[in-house]
Image (cartoon, rainbow, N blue to C red):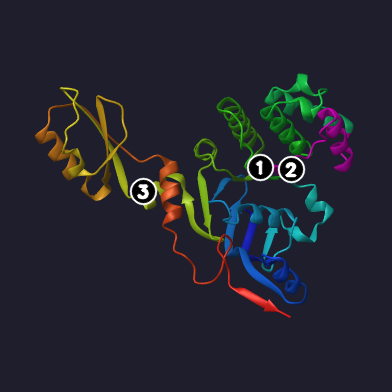
Amino acid sequence: MAIIEIENLSKTYRVYRKPEGIAASIRGIFRRHYSVVEAVRSIDLVVELGQFVAFLGPNGAGKTTTLKLLSGVITPTSGSARVLGHVPWHRENAYRRRFALVMGQKNQLWWDLPAAESFRLHQQIYRIEPGQFDRRRDELTGLLGVRKLLHQPVRELSLGERMKMELTAALLHSPEVLFLDEPTIGLDVVAQHNIQSFLKHYQELRKITILLTSHYMKDVAALCRRVVVIALGRIIYDGSLSGIIDRFGGHKVVTIQLSNGQTPDDLGRYGEVLPSEPPRARLRVGRDVVTDVLGSLLSRYAIVDISVEDPPLEDVIADMFTRVDEPSEPTLGQVPELLNEE
């Protein structure tokens, strides 16, 4: 069953480019120069019931813009989208009660009030029955380990504790769809792990549909089986996490340890020598020549240990972004052609 259906969705902005200098600024009052920014470019996407989908891309790729479109925060320039059968930008109350949006860099809780007071406000906004509200609040704060912090002002909480409260607020009305925009940004390793564990448990328990954006590949690896990659406003990959490595990871990492503990001076002939700690040495080797390289290494050197691994996911993703072809027309992140308007 399709929960999110996107077809040919685009969002274009006209941005005023203020010129430098006083004289140019005065001329700009009468003749303005605008640039066209294509934040999202004709994307198509279908997300099924209960899927946990990672939505990846570099800064300025269009990830947050897409989430805002699906949340009804902004309206598209063209195309269509339906979430739970609703058109998001129609902003129907029936739809608002069925989804939630959590943005790691935005707060929905009152800064100077305890989280418990903000939760009560959410109860009134979403018209949650008192008994159900108490059960949901206690369940969520218990799972997240923040029940004792309910009556502490939000400004006194750590970043990780605040994010747990943000998640609690977002889930109080039992949404069927959850949009997460960088929920672990700025968190330490322990806080990231706690948030990941909670999201994985909650999604498996409630079977809700989640669309996640994150720059932390550990979030993606821990939570998502399906990955959608967007760059320059377009979807360039939609598939499994392992498929990214198979398709875009053009090399393997070979690690060897010689019996004498030394690193051969001519090791670079087999591939790119990567930083490593002695007595081990690491090589970046093309996938198509791994077998030949292993045979040559084993025949020439007294090797006591050898391993072949896929490159780190972060490296594959970064390499994929750098290999995206530049579009012919202006897009987000580029300097677009100026449009003159009298």
Report the Cα–Cα distance between label 3 and label 1. 31 Å
Q: Which tag, 1 or 2, sits closer to the chain's start?
A: 2
Indicate the position of residue 309 as horizontal and vertical percent values: 32, 37
Residue at 58% across, 59% down: 45
The residue to which callout 1 is attached is 208
Report the Cα–Cα distance between label 1 and label 2. 8 Å
The amino acid type of the residue labelled 3 equals Gly
Check the image and report above or below for 203 versus 340: above
Per the image, label 1 sits on a secondary structure element best described as: loop
Report the Cα–Cα distance between label 2 and label 3. 37 Å
Q: Is residue 43 left or right of residue 92?
A: left
Residue at 26% across, 27% down: 280
Indicate the position of residue 105 as horizontal and vertical percent values: 68, 41
Quadrant position of the C terminus in the picture: bottom right
Q: Which mark is residue 249?
A: 3
Magenta residues, start to end:
101-129
Check the image and report above or below for 163 versus 214: above
Indicate the position of residue 15 as horizontal and vertical percent values: 69, 66
The residue to which callout 2 is attached is 175
Labels 2 and 3 touching (C-beta < 8 A): no
Q: Which mark is residue 323?
A: none
Q: Residues within 10 Å of mark 3 (few under 14, many from 20)?
A: many
Q: Residues within 10 Å of mark 2 (few under 14, many from 20)?
A: some
Residue at 52% across, 40% down: 220
The amino acid type of the residue labelled 1 equals Ile
The amino acid type of the residue labelled 2 equals Pro
